[in-house]
Amino acid sequence: MSTALDERDAKPAGQPIRRSGGREARRAMRAAPLADDIRPIRPGLEGGRYKPLGQDDLARIHEAVLTLLETVGFANAIPSCIEALTRVGASYDADGRIRFPRELVLATIKTAARNFTLYGQDPRHDMQVQGTRVHYGTAGAAVHLVDVERREYRESLLQDIYDAARLVEGLDNIHFFQRPMVPRDIPNPADMDFNTLYACVMGTSKHVGTSFTVRENVAPALEMLYAIAGGEENFRARPFVSNSNCFVVPPMKFAEDACGVLESCVEGGIPILLLSAGQAGATAPAAIAGAVVQAVAEVLAGLVYVNALKPGHPAIFGTWPFVSDLRTGAMSGGSAEQALLTAACAQMAQFYDLPGGSAAGMADSKLPDIQSGYEKGITNVMAGLSGLNLVYESAGMHASLLGFCLESLIIDNDMLGHCQRCVRGIEVTDAALSIDTIAEVCLNGPGHYLGNEQTLRLMQTEYFYPAIGDRFSPKEWNEKGKPDILQRAIVEKKRVLAERFPRHVPRQVDDRLRAKFANILLPRTGMGG
Amino acid sequence: MSTALDERDAKPAGQPIRRSGGREARRAMRAAPLADDIRPIRPGLEGGRYKPLGQDDLARIHEAVLTLLETVGFANAIPSCIEALTRVGASYDADGRIRFPRELVLATIKTAARNFTLYGQDPRHDMQVQGTRVHYGTAGAAVHLVDVERREYRESLLQDIYDAARLVEGLDNIHFFQRPMVPRDIPNPADMDFNTLYACVMGTSKHVGTSFTVRENVAPALEMLYAIAGGEENFRARPFVSNSNCFVVPPMKFAEDACGVLESCVEGGIPILLLSAGQAGATAPAAIAGAVVQAVAEVLAGLVYVNALKPGHPAIFGTWPFVSDLRTGAMSGGSAEQALLTAACAQMAQFYDLPGGSAAGMADSKLPDIQSGYEKGITNVMAGLSGLNLVYESAGMHASLLGFCLESLIIDNDMLGHCQRCVRGIEVTDAALSIDTIAEVCLNGPGHYLGNEQTLRLMQTEYFYPAIGDRFSPKEWNEKGKPDILQRAIVEKKRVLAERFPRHVPRQVDDRLRAKFANILLPRTGMGG
């Protein structure tokens, strides 16, 4: 992202208040890179200052959840699931439903894994998911790539997934990479699962999330991951891939294939994102509180399941209730109701002190336009302020999960920078209250704060600067030929995709993978040769 | 805004989950207009669930403010200001500064006007500004109109102000109209002030905010307002115009002309927006907390001033600290730091239980593009969630207050609808928790909630639907010729401006005004003939 920024540093933008006041000093400071601990934003900033639910609301939702699990339970459990759950105390009833006594649910909540780390291949990208620490990342299963230049939707391809991964590799405000698209050029599900994962882990050293269609597709994936990690133990010690697992078909039914996948992933050492994706008004209640209740109940059922298989296996509390436009039944990912649902889910995860993941940033808009901007901005900032540990779908997504856009990734990285700066919040210390600074400036000083010691000190540590966002004055904007943010993003995308071919997986490891797995379909030519 | 909506109701959009399930019933319900009290959003929804500052932070800021007012005080008071302030106990010191004993400030806070109403010409638009009730409106002094079709900035004209006012008249989610542009076609300040106000009050029956250059320009304005109100008493009983008054030149200096205006407005019965617009890092401290401290101190000084002139005169706590891009000194209205400043100011107003007004929605972006979308969405939703009573600049603004855009007004009305739905929050009642609904659907029902009684009941009262925002599926979007939101806004703007010529001020009253004031410059032809 250095191009856009450098250009502006070289010729400062905006409407200067005055041209004096230490600009050279400011520019010199700005040129030096910042140590991670004094950067204005970073992964894992603590949110939680926005609380859509009151304490009493949380308790009532919890109580409703326990009642539902006890009285309604889950249908469609596969035999191994029935075996695991009845072994720990669930009942398998005559109507074919598994029901969960509240003691079982409460005991599971108490002993489930918490405060764990989601690892990157590169330890710099490790994420501690706990408390109200906030991380933003991608996700999805879009079937289209949004081609901004042609203004059209085309089928998404394997290369697009790899390209998205390597873009994310360099976007500081996107902290993890869950596969955002499905490769429509690979019809065979086994090849699709394997190559999707391959494209993700080769494209980025950040934590990767992926899905599997059926249980049988997990084993070859594990073999690949163990090979990349340099052995099974290494992977199990630092699993850098998690399984996004839709184990539930809302309302309150197990998804048979996904449950098989879940069991294999637990066995193989892959953390599970327990993903309940009901849609309010369609597969979940239209009442927002009810949609939260159902999602929490569903994920807790999954949590009991995972812990029945392997106590303490890392699982993410993935309440992802979506919203329907009730006029049509279509999903509306960019809606205000979605923002509320997601923030409420963050609070429920905190109520249980479990690592929470939910979705924000899903625009209804088809293109990176003003609508997508406010839809993404509102949903993402509320997710962050609520202290959601893992904000999935936060970048690149359009058309309520049907289209993914590489240019949007680049623009959304700035937007997420804004969100993270908001999450970081306001420091109130004696120094920050600035009594002495104000008195000095007013009584003995120049009557302004430009060039003031405090200003110079805080300009890098307190202020976030967008990389591609435009702060030109109208005059400068005009003189520069009215730059368009989409055009800038297109240029930046092309620059990065021409240059960045991550090599965190050494070439010789890749050679061995290609020798072993004949079905690797991403050509070397698409990976920098 | 009915066009876009009707089109979509006629041919439902999106990705239907299933085509059955009571769509006809939903459409029939949707066709009936909603009573105001069950609309999903409305003016004055209560925010406050987002609190950027802790209780202790608030107390520390308050203490710093009292110290500053006592020890630093204000320079540049005009004689009548010195007279008024020293009369109530402020000191006028040898260094030419007015200082405010803490007892004076505390006593003023205690007795100042609160819980008052800002009136519209039409009582439907009255706003009770108190507690955490949220209202969104325009503001600004942009010198350019953003011409979306030509993709250029041109000087703003008197007709533009009138056009903006009549657009706002029909945009439900914009609750008041403070003049957003200055008429660059009127060089004479007296004519400019008078005609600006005329264009505003003729264009909308919502509450209007305006400015005056100098004290002498207030009297003719009052004469016009009294005439429109049908007499001075009527206006004083329901003042439908407030004065946006920059009485302070930050840091901590009175603005001489504005103070003269303030005194005339107080005398004439016009509520005052006490507007402190320091810019962090330039005319206010770069530390966010310090910028808040200075803004609060400045507005409290103004509050003492107003109450010294006339105890209990309605005044809005207008802490509007702005942000500098510290690399250049230019203002950055769309920044994350701006969102934090504004939300913190909302909390300070609540700390004093005074009606608070601050600014959000100021995009740095020059056009209604994705950047402006996220900048506006993030800042506006945080302002609302923080419970800011009056969110100024919330619609139409670009280029950090230098450009105003009529098409953005229309698009931002949807964005503000999202914000208001988020402010409304989540209802947690037994019915909303939906235990019975979920049990019924899972155990005895169809396994989904489409067409469910709850779904039908909540679809209008719980869900906000954008008027111009697009929720088409990619397929439908393609079939419809890839509609562009800017094009839709242009069409809608032209439709409204061709049709809507508000007549809340009867023609005969306007005739009398035109007979009395030869300097009315807005031609009848621009007002529908």
Image: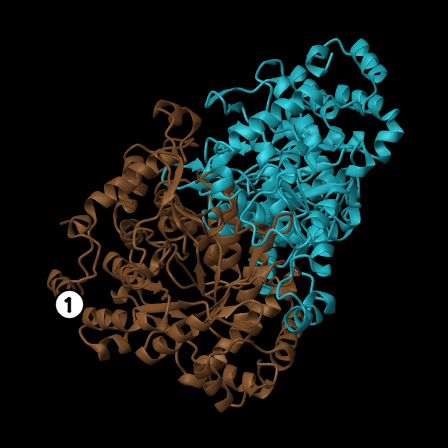
Chain colours: A cyan, B brown
Q: As shown in the figure, which amino acid type bears the numbered disc 1?
A: Lys
Is A274 positioned to the left or the right of B366 in the image? Answer: right
* Residue B229 pos. (x, y %): 21, 71
Q: Nearer the viewer, residue B218 or A431?
A: B218
Residue A446, compared with residue B300, is above or below; it is: above
Task: Give the letter of the chain under mark 1.
Answer: B
Is B452 positioned to the left or the right of A423 in the image? Answer: left
Is A233 positioned to the left or the right of A468 in the image? Answer: right
* Residue B522 pos. (x, y %): 21, 54
Residue A57 seen in render: no
Residue B108 seen in render: yes
Q: Nearer the viewer, residue B450 or B283?
A: B283
Residue drawn at x 68%, y 38% as measured from the top left: A273
Is A350 positioned to the left or the right of A35 in the image? Answer: left
Residue drawn at x 42%, y 71% as measured from the top left: B257
Q: Nearer the viewer, residue B309 or A518?
A: B309
Quadrant occupied by the N terminus of chain B: top left
Q: Which residue is mark 1?
A: B516
Residue drawn at x 81%, y 11% as measured from the top left: A516
